[in-house]
Amino acid sequence: MSAAKSTIDHRVFSAGRLSLGLTLPLLRAGEIVADFREQIGLAALADMLGFRALWVRDVPLNSADYPDPVGHLDPWVLLGALASHTTQIALASGAIVLTLRHPLHIAKGAGSVQTLSNGRFILGLGSGDRPPEYAAFGRDAEARRELYRTHWDTVAAALGDAPRVIPDLRPENAPDFMLLPEPPLPVPMLAVGSGGQSVDWIARHSIGWMTYHREPETQRARHSMWRAAVDRLPAPAFRAFGVAMRLDLSDNPHEPATPLSLGYRAGRHALLAVLDDMRENGTHHVTLNLGSDRPVRDVMEELAADVLPKFHA
């Protein structure tokens, strides 16, 4: 990026600091049908309360065989609505399935959200991990690693400092294309999951690496591997490390942390300790996937009152 460098990624990812975001949809435990009008209101509340990012998933197809029964809106439609109903909070995709969408369509969507949000978009990109979905879209799951790299290059070219369109084919006398309107700032691109790539490739091409919560010892090992890759870059650079974590926030603030799949059940005091340990071990952002018996607004307001000030001051 140039002098017109995006700043939204620095509000979410900053060296030595930890910020907190939320993953949509925001549902109570056991809910599988989201009222997306309510979700837009909760997103506006998250913006007002001071959360740093809202994360939107790309789930093209559902199946009874999949563990997640929640129906997700098309991410570009939802991101457009979020851009129109928030003012400060970062909007992030976690993640657009880079291998199942044409990269120029992704670039057009990302530039559109960047324009509507006035520069608040972070483009998280993943490769998907379900071979039957590849077949449904006429893609070869075995080719996903190469697809990820080539599609990444096309998106990066279209959204960078000097935007240019890389066509799949260029017939004789074909015109040069451009994507308009040009967004106000280049769009930061973030690797979500590995996409079948090495950590060295991710460190060279992405602003950082977003991964799922794992038990602390495993996560520390992954972070050490990431730091080593960042240290191998030819020039010193900051590269972010972020985690998506499930949270069942107890209404008892003193309840100890109990491990859950991809996260914890905890009272706020134990949660503060967990997050502080993550910050000390080099995590820059945690997006919380809420799920408890409590009303979502109550959980958000408790987090904003008693947790966010410890990290966002």
Image (cartoon, rainbow, N blue to C red):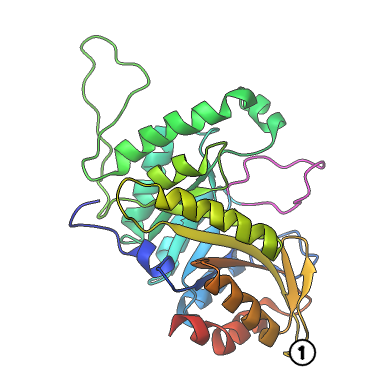
For the point 44% across and 55% down, the residue is 80
Q: Is residue 11 magenta?
A: no
Image position of 31 (left or right of 213): right
Residue ranking furthest to the left: 3
Q: Is residue 203 above or below residue 105?
A: below
> Is any part of residue 94 visible from this angle?
no
Number of numbered callouts drawn:
1
Where is residue 74 shown, x and y percent of the image? 56, 47
Residue indicated by mark 1 = 252
**Residue 129 visible in image:** yes
Q: Residue at x 45, y 32 (%)?
A: 149
Quadrant where the C terminus lies? bottom left
Which residue is drawn at the image coordinates 34% and 51% (left, top)?
Answer: 187
Camera-side residue of 5 and 170: 5
In terms of image quadrants, where is residue 224? bottom right
* 120 w.r.t. 192: above or below: below
Residue 256: give x, y in percent of width and height.
77, 83
- Where residue 244 appears, as percent x and y from the top left, is 61, 61
Q: Nearer the viewer, residue 44 or 59?
A: 59
> Residue 118 appears at what percent x and percent y?
31, 61
Amino acid type at image mark 1: Asn
Q: Who's the residue at 40% across and 68% down the image?
A: 14
Q: Is residue 19 left or right of residue 267?
A: left
Q: Quarter-wise, where is residue 138 in the image?
A: top right
Residue 240 lies, with reference to residue 306, above or below; the image says above
For the stretch drawn in magenta, the main secondary structure is: loop
Q: Secondary structure at mark 1?
A: loop
In magenta, the rendered stretch is 58-72
Drawn side of residue 232 relative to residue 65, left or right: left
Q: Nearer the viewer, residue 294 or 284?
A: 284
Other-residue count near label 1 (Cα within 10 Å), few / some / many at <14 / 14–19 / ≥20: few
